Image: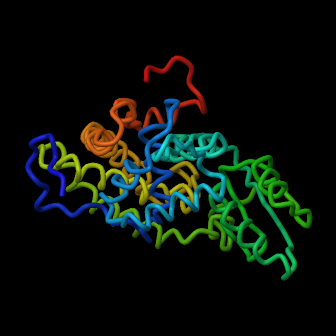
Amino acid sequence: MRSDSVPVRELEDVALPRAQGGSSPQHLLVTLLGDYWIRQDGDLPSAGLIDLLAEFEVSASSARAALNRLLRRGLVDIRKAGRQTFYRLSHQVVERVVEGGRRIASFGLPTDWDGQWTIVAFSIPENRRESRHLLRSRLSWFGFAPLYDALWVSATSTAADARAVLAALDITSATVFTATAETTVDRSPLSAWDLDALASVYTTFLAETRPLLDAVLAGRVAPRQALIARTRLMDTYRRFPGTDPGLPSAHMPQGWPREEARALFTEVYNALGPLAESRVKQIMGAHDAEAARRARFQSVEQLRDRPATEEGTPA
């Protein structure tokens, strides 16, 4: 096992954030590439990526299989040089990663709400069951929730967002419209979300993450642990935008913990960044010094503001 190059005492008394539901090796790869290499142009050696996934207890064979699956799905581009193989995120995936990062990093910021709900009603035949599943998944990502089985609502996404999802899946048997509705009556659009369950998830997140902040501020987190903890932290927090209605706090139950969770996530994620980056550079440097030099962690502020491409960014 490698030893960390930065002499930081091991994190002994703080549990790392739990991976909620776990992440597949494919998802881990896209997350890591999107965090540490999204702003630079260049590919990465497969051996370095395999070692990077090994930090998360992904075997070499599973890592190779994940790279092959991403390649078959068109999510990564490949280059061969002699006996070496190099990968990079495809342009299409870069745009999706950037947009996803922007949405996650913007979640929880104070917003105004005009009282309008976007509503999607759809009817999909049984022989298109897969399309129905994809529609629900993508509507959830855009902040919609099912008020009824085939009637989904959102206060944060637009009719244009909904129409784009429907068009991408070639679903024509659907109607999109906007309307106002009270949030205090029974079976209001707000009841599409299980707020009690979500509040409990927030409470768990806060309880598990506060000790991690104390540990990193006290210098008790080693680079390897920082890399793992930071990636798991994002994997957990990224689920909130798809499960929280996103309404301003005045329309949510008293003491709604969204803003507290966002503030804590931002502080811990940013604080872990330099340590995690040093570990990424150490792992990749054993295979490609230039690729290691280009690795840069992305702060929450950079995720929120970064463009899909950036001219003149120092490598």
Classify residue 237 by image quadrant.
bottom left
Q: Quadrant of the C terminus?
A: top left
Q: Is residue 92 above or below residue 1?
A: above
Determine if residue 137 is in view.
yes
Can you name the residue that lies furthest to the top here?
312
The mark tally for this picture is 0
Residue 103: x and y in percent read: 56, 45
**Up/down of 158 relative to 203, above or below:** above
Residue 104 x, y percent position in the rendering:
51, 47
**Which of 84/96 is in front?**
84
- Residue 283 vs residue 133, the one in the foreground: 283
- Which residue: 24% across, 54% down? 210
Q: Residue at x 42, y 69 (%)?
A: 22
Quadrant (top left, top right, bottom left, bottom right) of the N terminus: bottom left
**Residue 267 appears in the rendering:** no
Tell me if 286 is positioned left or right of 42 in this view. Answer: left
Q: Residue at x 43, y 44 (%)?
A: 45
Q: Give residue 192's position: percent from left, percent from top.
A: 64, 69
Colour convention? rainbow
- Where is residue 14? Give x, y as percent: 17, 61
**Horizontal side of residue 163 vs 301, given as left or right:** right
Q: Residue furthest right?
A: 172
**Which residue lies at the image location 50% right of the left edge and 44% below the top edge?**
86
- Pick out the residue farthest to the bottom: 126
Quarter-wise, where is residue 314 in the image? top left
